[in-house]
Image (cartoon, rainbow, N blue to C red):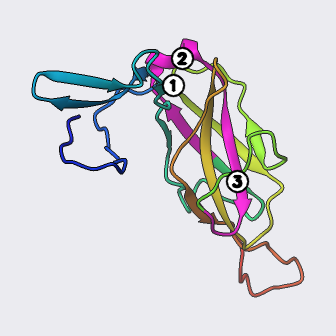
Amino acid sequence: KKASGTSKIGYDVALADLTEYTSYEYCAYAKTGEDVTYYPESDFPVFKTYANVTLAEVNNDTDKTSNSVTLTGGFNAALVDQIKEYGFCYIAGYTDTPPSITSENSIKVTENTSGSFSGTINGLNANKQYSCWAYVKTADDMVSYSPVQQFKTKFAVDSDDDTGAGWD
């Protein structure tokens, strides 16, 4: 991407339309007349784009109970040979920051997949708000997360309550 101007202060350039899970080299350059100067001059830095991970919207009627939720995630099937782990993680409450995939709030899905996977998180508290993500871990240990989804578990059934209030 080309940016122009004169300044001794650095600038940011947003790159778009990059291919997921691909390495790119980059550098800055300055052109004065016919002279071009690159920085760094050699051994350009490399960055790698993350794998794209999806998480299906939680269905209020079929995916939740008072203490569990069933989630469905996905990734590009063309990357299946590069993915070494996938699953879901969650935190009670509203947040945009996922927990570590090694935390107790993470489940690893072990089914064979061609890009789509599902799993059930058990042991949740009734009538509580949660934030959740699907994740994939690639062969080079890069972890990619889906955008966050929020859901609220159902009320627990109180066997002493004969009104039926809060039943699943």
Instruction: Say what secondary structure mark 2 lies in.
Output: helix
In the rendered structure, which amino acid carries the disc numbered 2?
A: Val
List the residue tagged with mark 3.
90
Residue 75 sits inside the magenta stretch: yes
Query: Residue 97, percent across and down?
Result: 63, 56
Categorize mark 1 by other alpha carbons within 10 Å: few (<14), some (14-19), many (20+).
some
Q: Are marks 2 and 1 in contact (CB under 8 Å)?
A: yes
Q: Dot 2 corresponds to which residue?
A: 80
Q: Amino acid at mark 3?
A: Tyr
- Residue 52 placement, left or right of 149: left
Mark-to-mark CA distance, 2 and 1 = 7 Å
Q: Are marks 1 and 3 in contact (CB under 8 Å)?
A: no
Judging depth in this view, the residue of 119 and 38 nearest the camera is 38
Circle 2 Cα neighbour tier, 10 Å, few/some/many (<14 / 14–19 / ≥20): some
Q: Which residues are magenta?
A: 71-95
Image height of 50 relative to 157, above or below = above
Above or below 14: residue 110: above
Q: Which residue is mark 1?
A: 115
Task: Indicate whether residue 55 is drawn in magenta.
Answer: no
Q: As shown in the figure, which amino acid type bears the numbered disc 1?
A: Gly
The residue sitting at 33% across, 30% down in the picture is: 18
Q: Earlier in the sequence, mark 3 or mark 2?
A: 2
Q: Horizontal and vertical percent for residue 20?
A: 41, 27
Element type at mark 1: loop
**What separation in Å lies between label 3 and label 2 (alpha carbons)?**
24 Å
In this picture, residue 23 sits left or right of residue 160: left
- How packed mark 3 is, by other alpha carbons closer than 10 Å (few <14, some 14-19, many 20 or more), is many
